[in-house]
Image (cartoon, rainbow, N blue to C red):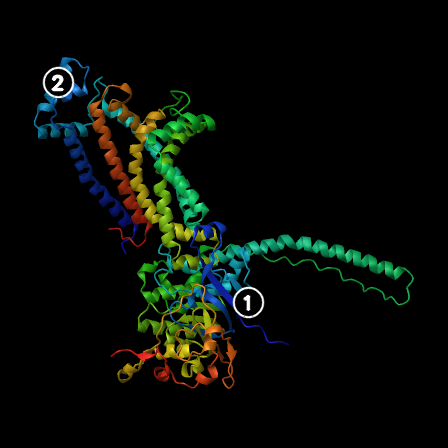
Amino acid sequence: MSAPPPLLEVEGLEKFFPITRSLTETFQRRSARAVHAVDGVSLSVGRGEALGLIGESGSGKTTFGWVVSRLHDPTGGTIRFNGQDVTKLQGTRLRQWRRNIQIVFQDPVGSLDPRLRVWQIVGEPLRAQNPIDRTLAKEARARAPAEFRVAQEKYRRDLAEHQRAKSSPPEPGRSLPPEPQPPEAPKLPEVPPRITKAQVRARVQEILPTVGLPPDCLDQYPHEFSGGGRQRISLARALIVNPSLIVLDEPTSALDVAVQAQILNRLVALQRERGLSYVLITHNVAAVRFVADRVAVMYLGRLVEVGGVREVLEHPVHPYTKALLAAVPYPDPSRRRTRYRIGGDIPSLVDPKPGCRFSPRCPFVIDRCRVEDPPLRTIPGLGERLVSCHRAEEVQDIAPETLLATGPTSARPLPT
Amino acid sequence: MGRNPGDLLIFIGKRLLQLIPVVLGVIILTFICTHLKLVGLCNAVYPHASPEVIAACNAKYSAPLLTQFVQYLTSLFQGNWGASPLGTPVYPAIAADLPATVELVLAALFIMVVIGIPLGVVAAQYSGRWADHLVRIFYLSGWATPTYLGAVIAAVFLGPALGLPSGGEYSTVVPPFPQYTHMSVVDAIIALNFPYTIDAIEHLILPASVLAFINMGIATRMTRASMLEVLPLDYVRSARMKGLGEFWVLYKHALRNALITTTTVLGVTAGGLLAGTVVVEEVFDWPGIGQYAYDAVGGGGSTANFDGAIAVVIIFAIGVVVANMIADIMYGVLDPRVEWR
C-alpha cells in the first residue's frame, strides 16, 4: 500500500501577471511581457506540518500563498489537495473546497470588514458554507433516482441475459454469466437544515476562547480591538470551518513584539490541539524557527532551498540563504559590524533571463550560472535538503560570515 | 461607545438644531440679494402695472433695510409669503407644488441608486475593460447633456417611441380623487386607484429618467472609485475565502463599504437635482415648484412674480441644506466607526 498523498502538493506552479503596454496588445488581448511572480514552484506540505516560507519582499511568497488557496488562478502547474487536483475547481465546488484551506492576512485593519460585528465576521463562513452543502445535497438527491433507474435497467438486462443463458442448452466452452445483484435503493443524502443566527452565534462563542478572545465580544466591531485582537479575530474566522491547512501571510509583521509572541504561541498550541498544517509566509526568521518544521526559501519567484528548519537555518547551503540569514540582526552589539549585504540590484521580475535568478548578485557566480537554470536537487550527505545551486557542493561549508571575503565585487560590510 | 438608539436621537437633534442658523443665514442672504435698492426696480418687475401698484411697491422698498427684513421675516413665519402681481398668494401655491417636485427628485434619486450604483460596481469589477468603457460612455454622455436638450429630446422623441406620456402628472387634468399629499403616485395609491397609480408612474418615468440620466455620473463614478479603493482590501479576499459567491463578495462586503462615500455624495447631489427640476418640470409640464419658479421669473411670457421667486430660492436653498443634513446623518448611521455625538 502506497503512502497517503501529502496534504498539499504543488507542482511547477506558475503565476504570471501580464503587463499590457501598447494599443495593439490591448486589442489582441495578449501581452508580450509578464511579471513572473511565481515561476515554477514545487512544494509539498504534510498533515500536521508547518512549512515556513521566507524570502525578501517581492519574492513571490504572498502570491504563492494566494494561488495555493485559489485566490488567484495559477498560470500553470497543478495544486493537489489530499490527492485531489484542485487547480481547475470552479463555482460551487471551489467554494465548497475553500473550507479546507484558509488564509490569515497580514494587515489586521484591512482584513476585517469594518461594517460587520465580530460574530458576523467570524460566523460568516458558516453561513456561506451552509447553502453550499444544501445545494450539493439537493443536487445529489435529484440525481439519485435517475442513477437508480439506470442501475435497475442494467439489472433487468443482465437478469434476462442470465435467464436466457440458463434456459438455452449450454454451449461448450461458454460459462454461465453470473447472476446479477439487484441494485440497492439509493441512500438519499440528508439536506442539512438552514443554519440559524443563534447557531452561528453559539459556534462563534465556542471558537473565540480558542484564539484567546473573550466570548462576550460577539457584538463588538473590529475597530474596537487592538492589532493583536484583530489578528485573533482573523484567526477565529479561519478556524471556524475546521480547515486542515492555514496559510499565514505574515500574520505578525504588523504587531509589536510582545503581541507577536502571544500570537505565535497560540498558533503552535492550535496546531498541536487540532493537527493543523501551516504555510507560514514571513520574513521573520525567528518566527519560522519557532513555528515551522520545514522551511522553504524563495527568491524572485523560485525556490532556492528547502529543508528542515534547524538544518537550513544553522547550515544554509544556497548563497542566497546565507546572505538572507547573515542579514538577520543578531542581538549582540559587539557583532553589529559583521552585518553583510549583498550588492547588485534586485533583477526585474518582468520576463526574467535564463540562468540562476541569483547569479547577478551571487559572490560565487560562474559562467554556467548565467546560462543554465539550476534545478532543485538533493545534495549528497544532506538528506532531505533541496538546493537549487550548481555549486552547492562547493559552497555548502562556507559560513555566511565569510561571504565578505569571497565576494568578487558585491559583498562588503556596511560603512561604519 | 456612543452608538445607542438614544444617542442617535441626540445626534439627529443636534443636526436639526444646527440647521436653524444655516436656514436663517440663507434667508438673510436671499433677502439682501433681492432687496438691494435698485433704481426703477418696481417698474422693471411690474412693467404693465397700474400707478397704484407701482406706488405701493416703491413704498415697500423705500423703508430701511432692517425694518423691511423684520417685516419680511415676521410675515414669513406667519405664512404670508407675499403674492403675485395678480394677487395670488405665494405660500399656498408653493405648498401645493413642492410635494410634486420632491416626488420627482426622489424618483430621480431612486433611478440613480438602482441603475447608477450597480453600473459603478460593474465598472469597478471590469475596470479597464470594455464594460468599464461602456459604463463611462454612458454616464459621461449624461453628464455632457444640457438639461434642456435632454428633456426636449426625451419629451419629443423618446416619449412617443416608448409609448410613454411626456406631460403632466396624469392623463386627465384633474384626477377623480382628492390630492392629500400632492404627490401623484402617492395620492393614487392612497385612493387605491390602480389604473391611476400605473398612469401616474408612467407619467413620472420620463422626467425622472432625464433628471437621473443627467446626474447619474456622480453616483456611478463615486461608486466605481470607492469600489476600486475597497476591492484590493484583504477583507474582500477573506470574504472570498469564506466561500461566498462573487455576488455576495461584491455587493455585501465591497459595496456596503464603498457606499459610505456614495451616500454622502448622493445627498449633496439631491440638492443639485432641485436645480435641474426647473427646466425638466417646464418641459414635461410637471406641476412642481420648478415650473412655478420658471413662471415666477417671467419665463414663457408669464408675468414676473417677485415674491414667488424669492420664496423658491429660499425653498431650494433649504432643500440643499436639508439634503446635506440627511447625507451627514446617513454617514453617521452607516459607518459604525462614527460615534453619535
- The quadrant of the image that shows the C terminus of chain A is bottom left
Local packing at callout 1 (Cα closer than 10 Å; few below 14, some 14-19, many 20+) is some
Task: Report which quarter residue B317 is drawn in.
Answer: top left
Above or below, B319 against A117 in this view is above
- Give the answer, above or below, for where B56 lies relative to A247: above
Compute the Cα span from label 1 to label 2. Answer: 93 Å
> Which element type, helix, strand or loop, lies under badge 1?
strand
Is B43 on the left or on the right of A20, as rendered?
Answer: left
- Would you say the residues marked 1 and 2 are in contact, meaning their CB atoms lie under 8 Å apart? no
- Residue A80 shows which numbered tag? 1
Q: Is residue B285 above or below residue A28?
A: above
Quadrant that contains the N terminus of chain A: bottom right
The vertical placement of A365 against B233, above or below, is: below
Image mark 1: chain: A
Q: Chain of mark 2?
A: B
> Residue at (16%, 28%) from the top-left corner?
B34
Q: Secondary structure at mark 2?
A: helix
Q: Residue B56 has which mark? A: 2
User: Which label sits in the foreground, 1 or 2?
Assistant: 1
Q: Residue at x 25, y 47 (%)?
A: B11
User: Residue A145 at what x, y percent from top left?
Assistant: 67, 53
Q: Position of residue B41 (x, y in %)?
A: 14, 22
**Residue B50 in which image quadrant:** top left
Question: Three-letter amino acid code at disc 1?
Answer: Arg
Q: Amino acid at mark 2?
A: Ala
Front position in the image: B85 or A78: A78
> Nearest the camera: A63 or A284?
A63
Q: Badge 2: how crowded within 10 Å, few (<14), some, or many (20+)? A: few
Looking at the rendered structure, which numbered label has been put on residue A59? none
